[in-house]
Amino acid sequence: MKRFFTTIKNIFSIEDLRVRILNTIGFLIIFRLGSYIVLPGIDANLLTGNQGGIFDLLNTFLGGSFSRASIFALGIMPYISASIVVQLLTVAVPHFTKMQKEGDSGRKKLNQFTRVLTIAITAAQSYGYLRATVNVEAIREPGMFFTVSSIFILVAGTMFCMWLGERITDKGIGNGISMLIMIGIVSRFPAAIYQEAIGKGMNGALLFILELLALFFVVVGVIALTQATRRIPVQYAKQVVGNKLYGGKRDFIPLKLNSAGVMPIIFAQALMFIPPLLAGIWRDSDIGAYVGSTFADFTSWQYNLLFAILILLFTFFYTAITVPSNDIADNLKRNGGFIPGIKPGKQTAEFIDSILSKITLPGALFLAAVAIMPAFAVQAGVTQNFAQFYGGTSLLILVGVVLDTLQQIESYLLMRHYEGMMKSGRVKGRSQFAAA
């Protein structure tokens, strides 16, 4: 306990880190306050707030703002959808690929395009949201003016959330977009665990303890998935600079079992919100009713099958983007490094790519299995609100964001020559390539 308080003291004794943590808390408070501001023209007391299925899951990610019809009802989900589209374009369209390789100027153009696309996606999703989730009885004066004004407000709310996320990334600690999602999830956890405990009662106390124990082991498994790495040994050749001999050391490239982190889950979840919202627009047709009922239920086999497939695809896709084997091989060759028994250059890139493919498949399968675990938890008798934390997207996002944030705090402590947060010396968040 003494060590814990010493670490906290060290954290707040670093001025830059202290300011960043306070900035992050301030931005998150603003985000939470905005989630309670209801859209003009809606009577909050008449909102049903019980959509069920996928809408409850979306409500969890947005910290309840979805069911409250707040100005942040859509949160940053449209921005994530736009980011998916842009990243796909950088792979499939040569113009966007070239733009991505132009450095800072290219990234600025892509960011600007992402913002414009976010506005278009938010406008489309806002219309679907107003029709599919807001009951007519809660609208004081339904009509064209209410619809148009609400769409403008929802678009502005999403853009403001995006701005908050960027400010957290620049002025705070951790990834801003992920932090906004995490705080929405955390805000729902106390109520979910309280409802689960009350629902079980004294007769179900043992069952509730077993559920908590199972949740503990799921968390341990998710942390193991996040931390697991495959180390590729690297040897650096000796170089003579002046009268001194440099190099000759051994190092390694840490390839993570799940190199894509939490992003495949976020991307896949963002796409899974689209079918029920679009189905709400054509809810009077048979196809719209079928799609809406099927994909609004996150325990249905159709939903979980599509969700798992999307996670597998995005895991391989995002891994290919974040871990470019050709760039790693070029960096090794440029710095005089090589993998023992493998020729530098093309063969090194092929070797890294083969190792990455072998470890990504089991990692992607485990990731998909954990993501659909809440559906099995519901079938086992766990209440829906608590089951969303029983593995699944919520837990993966929480573990990923917390580890990433702790890794950044650890870096500040070590940079200022303070002892790390863990006795072992390092908090392993998003790993960096030792050879890069």
Image: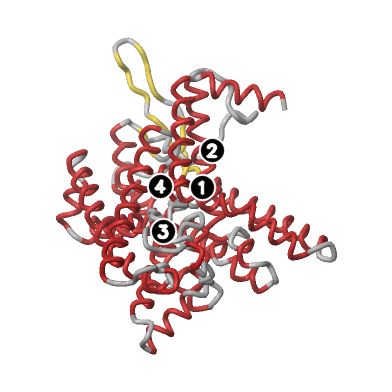
Amino acid under disc 3: Ala
Quadrant of the snapshot with the C terminus: top left
Distance between mark 2 and mark 1 Cα atoms: 22 Å
Find the residue positioned furthest to the top. Answer: 243
- Which numbered circle lies on residue 177? 4
Amino acid under disc 4: Ile
Instruction: Name the residue located 42 percent from the left edge and 84 percent from the top edge.
Output: 289
- Which numbered circle lies on residue 73? 3
Quadrant of the snapshot with the N terminus: top right
Task: Determine the secondary structure under disc 3.
Answer: loop
On the question of residue 291 being in view, the answer is yes
Q: Are marks 2 and 1 in contact (CB under 8 Å)?
A: no
Q: Are marks 3 and 4 in contact (CB under 8 Å)?
A: no
Instruction: Name the residue located 49 percent from the left edge and 67 percent from the top edge.
Output: 47
- Which numbered circle lies on residue 214? none
**First of labels 3, 4 by sequence position:** 3
- The x, y position of residue 328, in whole percent, is 34, 42
Distance between mark 3 and mark 4 Cα atoms: 15 Å
Q: Nearer the viewer, mark 4 or mark 1?
A: 1
How busy is the neighbourhood of tag 4: few (under 14 within 10 Å), some, or many (20 plus)? many
Distance between mark 2 and mark 4 Cα atoms: 21 Å
- Which numbered circle lies on residue 428? 2
Q: Are marks 1 and 3 in contact (CB under 8 Å)?
A: no
Distance between mark 2 and mark 3 Cα atoms: 34 Å
Closer to the camera, 395 or 40?
40
Amino acid under disc 2: Lys
